[in-house]
Amino acid sequence: MPSKITIPTAIIPLSLRSLPGLQSKPISSLPSPTHEHIARLIIDQKSASHALQTFRWATKIPNFTHSRSTYRALIHKLCTFRRFDTVKELLDEMPHSIQSPPDESIFITVIRGLGRAHMINDVVKATDLVSRFNMTPSLKIFNSILDVLVKEDIDLARAFYRKKMMASGVQGDDYTYAILMKGLCLTNRVGDGFKLLHVMKSRGVKPNSVIYNTLIHSLCKNGKVGRARSLMSYMEEPNDVTFSILICAYCKEENLVNALVLLEKSFSFGFVPDVVTITKVLELLCSVGRVTDAVEILERVESKGGVIDVVAYNTLIKGFCRLGKLKVGCRFLKEMERKGCLPNADTYNILISSYCETGGRIDDGLKILQLMEDSKEGSKGRISPYNSVLYGLYRENQQDEALEYLKQMEKLFPRAVDRSLKILGFCVDGNVEDAKRCFDQMIEEGGVPNVVIYDCLIHAYCQEERVREASELMKEMTGHGYVPIASTFNAVLSGLCRQGNVGTALKLVEEDMRGIGRGSLPGSGHYSPLIKALCEKGGFQSASMLLVQMVGKGILPDYLTWNSLLICLSQQTTWLLLLLLNEMVSFGMVVHELSAKEKRCKLRSLNHLAHGAGSVWLGMRIHDTTHTFIIHRRVEVGHVFCSSSSLKDVVDT
């Protein structure tokens, strides 16, 4: 009578543990487990030794004999832990223990295991391993070897195909050629890919959609989308993957027309592109303001049974927010919730940031923030929605309120807020090095600096005349989506001008002008330091051109700008000064306070101008075809009065 064996509970699969009385009954009194149960039990083990122990334990179960499936499970597990010596022992053991040699699936398992271990020489010799059991390697085994080799070295794979497969008289199938095509395209050998396509057709092998799609994808990756589309016309049955590849490629090129044409063609074939492809089309439509068309496409995809995820909805909401249609964005927030697509932190942050970047609507942003906090998902530890509120306060020049809100965030983000307050404290104390060290540490740890930190550091650098560092930090700030307000921008601009870097300052203004669409609001403060610096260098022509640019953008010059130009011109040609005064009058510049030095300079200049023109003490008359401008020098110290009259109203003196 066979001895009763107690089953080790630790290695019993969950499915077997649920059998009634399994833990209390001996093996001999239980039905034999199936090969599927034992194979799953082996796969579930956490180490090679436990897998072997389980396999040997199962051998002792009465009325149970191992099969190829249990051997395959053990071999797979041993390959995972690179126990290839033991694998070879098991292969040699099989003909005796189960009276069957290893089959095709077991050899393929070994080949893939060797491939994962990057034991390429052993992979190439795998056919010899098969031959040891008096078996001829099948096409599947050859294809498995080829698949491993193309991931390592396409030239090695091609050599194997010629010297091993073709030499053995093995005719490759469409899967063989698909593997080779993948290897060629992975190494950007598109020309060789077309040659392979020709070879296939010449040998009577019909290229399948996988082969065509691989080549089409490679063409698109290399920017040859037109040629890729032409290749699609040779396909008898393009599939959804074909259309998705081409649509995404056209979207990448921002070729909206062709992307939409192919999308319609995809619909006509009965295909619905995947959500990634649809989202790219929505992004492109929204980027050119065609949000309504994007909504129509989304609805068509849903009506055809396509899946729309939160990223697609976020794209639409962002599109509406860019157009200033925040209410519509909120409506889509409710719509996606109604359809069972839960908003995430990005969804709420799009709306929060949009409200906060719109003048005077921070309260609406805070309401959306409250909705996020009340939702099931919440912020998921994301600080970005709260940083958006800080940015909104910053844009409104509410620095005190921003600092107070930052302190309120401490309950939710204690580490981030504590680090931020430390940086601000260092800046206030003038310890810029300590502040930057703390800032860099925050970045290294994956922290997200808020706009308050950037603003404080930039001002601290400018106060120490470290304008280059301040400028770099402002660029970094802009890269994070924080457009600097006038006070931040002008601090850097003035610093550059003080140091004589007028060229760099000019480039900075040009870059800022290109950022108007992102919310940058240029003012006279942008130009005044530049014009003053140019005038001090005697560059009136450059300064006047900047003035023209300034006025062309609808920015009214302030008195500091005019004074800089007047002082510069008072030392130059008289008629230019008259033209400038003409412009001042047209802008309504009547009385301006001057510094003590400027008073002396201006009064001397105007006195010289008046006598040089032969005018009387009280003023002078300059005639042109439209106006007579009378410039009065007033006795009040430090004031220059300018007025204009029509020519017909002027009384001859």
Image: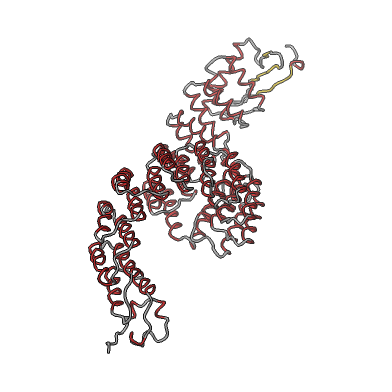
* Residue nearest the observer in this picture, 595 or 291: 291
Q: Write the residue at 58% across / 55% down.
A: 308
Instruction: Give the vertical position of 135 relative to 63 (above or below).
Output: above
Image spot of residue 534 (x, y percent): 49, 25
Instruction: Give the vertical position of 522 relative to 175 (above or below).
Output: above
Instruction: Give the vertical position of 79 relative to 257 (above or below).
Output: below
Instruction: Give the vertical position of 166 relative to 412 (above or below).
Output: above
* Residue nearest the observer in this picture, 206 or 257: 206
* Residue nearest the observer in this picture, 514 or 105: 105
Instruction: State left or right for residue 168 relative to residue 550.
Output: left
Q: Write the residue at 63% across / 55% down.
A: 304
Image spot of residue 387 (x, y percent): 51, 53
Image spot of residue 616 (x, y percent): 66, 13
Q: Does the image show residue 514?
A: yes
The residue lying furthest to the bottom in this view is 1
* Residue nearest the observer in this picture, 200 or 442: 200
